[in-house]
Amino acid sequence: KKLLLLDVDCGVDDAQAMMMALAAPNVQILGITCCHGNTTIDNVCRNVLRVLKVCRGTEIPVFRGACRSLLGQTLNASDYHGKDGLGDVPDPNSPGLEHVQTEHAVNAMIRIVTEHTGQISLVAVGPLTNVALAIKMDPTFSTKLKHLYIMGGNMEGRGNTTICGEFNFVSDPEAASIVLNQFACPIYIATWEYTKRHFLPWGFFHEWINQGTEKACFMKAITENSVKRMKIKQSDKEVHRREGFVSCDSFAVAAAIDGSVVTEYMQCGVSVELQGELTRGMMVLDTLNLQKKQNRAFIMVKCDLEKLKQLMMSALK
Ligand code: BDR
Ligand code: CA
């Protein structure tokens, strides 16, 4: 089985990505580490526990990680994911935070990766604060990983949070920069533009959430508000603002579960702009290899959407 460690800021698409990994028969999840991001760290932990409960995965340990970015600015994405980060659906039976491990997420990451040296793929789908701290606390951390999969950054200078910055990178630019500059294992990146380009038709989305299973009902409930928020009025009718539905974090998990989901990569040096007035947090690709970086990341370019759809469908069975 493939051994995965998931680092999440559990919003709606993190939940979708987690559910995909939890349902994959060829995968064993060794732990889920929580990071600030879409919502507060407590909400993130609670949301992870809720997802694990629905998926009967409560034996997987959950760890509380960084509650702020390295320089302390705190963003959230409640506009899209809701105040609680998971669509603001009341859940009276939500598991309590006492189910979160006492070990800090960064210590847990280092310990688990050391125990399984060379075998773990780390999938990071939130701000990279925990991963950057792990590298700083243990400089050999990344040499002990098999792969690192990231959802974050951008490849064509388009943003979703600032003009040209993607949420996870803009939430902690220094952490993203540390990770991209100091990583020793292969890195695979699903950028904002990659995920947006591979939207799924609304017809598929409705089929997906209406499978009638407990997991599908949960998905239907947590996506309702965010899908509503993406609608606009056009001549008295509510229409989707976007052509289709995008599950950003699922792209990173799908690539880790089944490498053939990504049909084209571009390998190049990557950096994060830390200074720019308009561009802070933007990922910059060195397609000409001018910086002569040793660790050139694999940027996902094309995705086999049919395979992605199959993984998503199975996740809610
Ligand atoms: C990323 O930002 C978050 O809101 C999503 O969970 C995803 O990880 C997309 O930019
Ligand atoms: Ca996320």
Image (cartoon, rainbow, N blue to C red):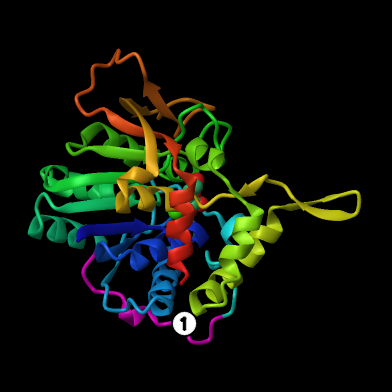
In the rendered view, tell whether residue 16 sits above or below residue 183: below
Which stretch did the figure color magenta?
Answer: 91-104
- Tell whether 56 sits left or right of 276: left
Residue 250 in picture, x, y percent from top left: 44, 53
Q: Is residue 87 visible?
A: no
- Tell whether 145 sits left or right of 122: left
Secondary structure under badge 1?
loop
Amino acid type at image mark 1:
Ser
Q: Is residue 31 visible?
A: yes
Query: Quadrant of the rendered structure where residue 302 is?
Result: top left
Q: Crowdedness of circle 1 by 10 Å Cα count: few (<14), some, many (20+)?
A: few
Secondary structure mostly seen in the magenta stretch:
loop
Q: How many marks?
A: 1
Residue 231 in picture, x, y percent from top left: 74, 53
Residue 115 in picture, x, y percent from top left: 8, 60
In the rendered view, tell whether residue 308 sits above or below residue 103: above
Q: Residue sitting at 26 percent across and 52 percent down? A: 122
Along the line of sight, which residue is nearer the eye, 309 or 32? 309
Q: Residue sitting at 86 percent across and 55 percent down? A: 237
Q: Residue sitting at 31 percent across and 58 percent down? A: 6
Q: Is 52 one of the magenta-colored residues?
A: no
Q: Is 98 one of the magenta-colored residues?
A: yes
Q: Which residue is mark 1?
A: 94
Along the line of sight, which residue is nearer the eye, 49 or 38? 49
